[in-house]
Image (tube, rainbow, N blue to C red):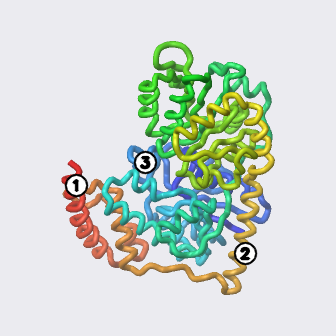
Amino acid sequence: MQICLLNDSFPPVIDGVTNAVVNYAEILNKKQDTEVMVGTPYYPDAEYSRYPYPVVAWPSLDTSSLTGGYRAGYMLPVKEIARMAQWQPDIIHTHCPIASLFVGRSLRDATGAPLILTYHTKFDIDIRRSIPVPVLQDESIRALVHNISSCDEIWAVSHGAGENLRSLGYEGEWKVMPNGVDFDRGRVSDDIVRRVTEGYDLPAGVPVFLFVGRIMNYKGLPMILDALKELKKDHDFRMVMIGRGADLNSLKETLEKYQISYDENTEEGMQSHPGTGFGKVIFTGAVADRENLRAWNTRADLFVFPSTFDTNGLVVREAAACGLASVLISESCAAEGVSDGRNGFLIEENAASLASFLTWACSHLPELHTAGEHAMNEIYISWQDAVAMAEKEYAVILEKKKSGRLKPHKELGDDQLYTMAADAAILFNDVHSQDLPAFEGMLDNLAAFGVTKRQELVSILQEKKTELEEQIRQHLKINE
């Protein structure tokens, strides 16, 4: 079986979906009867040649300032699609419903291989956060759902992820295919914990709470700070936050406002704010080394993850692998499979509920540790097990195709395709400009790929650009 994995991010980018693709590729590539190829947008500092499987990187645009470090890949990279098609994949599995899915659709047209999408992220939240104009938000979500509907099979990483997709207007079928964890089950040694946490002020007996993820407010981080504001009145604690993100400065401003001291690991070394001495909140920055991350999960007493954005909460399973229980928002995707008080803890989605629980937790560390042991035995799933489930489903899909039972995917007409391409061009361009988008490369790719209506696409771009500029002017005028 030859499996082509596609995604809009890959190392050096570090995020949950990247982690999923890397683990799929590594595990599948080690099997005797399986070969893997990965396709992803190009990053200048990537080292694609170091992987034991081919990585095809297609041209990309630098949108890192708008997206927190991500680049946007071309949607029709002709040369790269041709290279992947020559490899003749049996399965095309994309993990992102944007550029990678456009590439996957073209690759399916060239090879006839079934196209699978794993839906990892609530993209509507990111879209509405990053695009200020409602009409552009709606256009983007509509294009997203149209693109998703073209797949032969949809997998969701959790029930909540599938329900989110349904809420956006998707009407097709989907099934849950969970992600795994690349941590071994079990805690790391005390020696490793001491080495990794050396230099941090973590007194024995003082509760250590942990958050791992992107430092973005939609992860529930303001709720954590509001809860800590109440907790500090009567309890000592350490709140360790591992990760990077665009909202770090706003969090530090809030801590100063709440008069909560914090430590920050910078290029110049550990710095304490405000005042002197060690802080109750510790920002470590990103931790790429997986063994070091295991050490932090081993050292902590409780994982704090009040996010309703995440569809699967891989970090919750990583914590469980190390015997660390989590406090989560009741009925959130991250809380799926968690029993309150047994292998984790569930709260309401507000700071008062979190503050109340953390107050209880400070004097009930043994109960936290017991729940962590249960989490390690009950909600942990390895990547080996998760990928084995996916591999069995690959075989089922290929058998359906062979027998003619694979349901035909929803095709989009030419007009829809060109309109979606225009939408994408608009989103990548400064719509305030009076010039046409600088997308000659994309247009040339369309023409080279056999699209003969290049002028029609240009006309659509012109028409939609004029329309959207007027709507944006009206929006800005209303909100002045």
For the residues labelled 2 and 1, the Cα–Cα distance comes to 50 Å
The spot of residue 401 in percent (x, y) is 67, 81
- Residue type pointed to by label 2: Val
Task: Say if residue 222 shows up in the picture.
Answer: yes
Residue carrying label 3: 67
How packed is label 2: few (under 14 Cα within 10 Å), some, or many (20 or more)? Answer: few
- Residue type pointed to by label 3: Thr
For the residues labelled 3 and 2, the Cα–Cα distance comes to 37 Å
Pick whichever, 104 or 260, lies toward us: 260
Instruction: Name which quarter of the figure residue 120 lies in.
Output: bottom right
Indicate which disc, 1 or 3, sits on the residue closer to the N terminus: 3
Q: Is residue 383 above or below residue 148?
A: above
Residue carrying label 2: 396
Q: Secondary structure at mark 3?
A: helix
Dot 1 and dot 3 residues touching (CB under 8 Å): no
Task: Say if residue 81 shows up in the picture.
Answer: no
The spot of residue 28 in percent (x, y) is 72, 59
Q: Give the total number of marks visible in the rendering.
A: 3
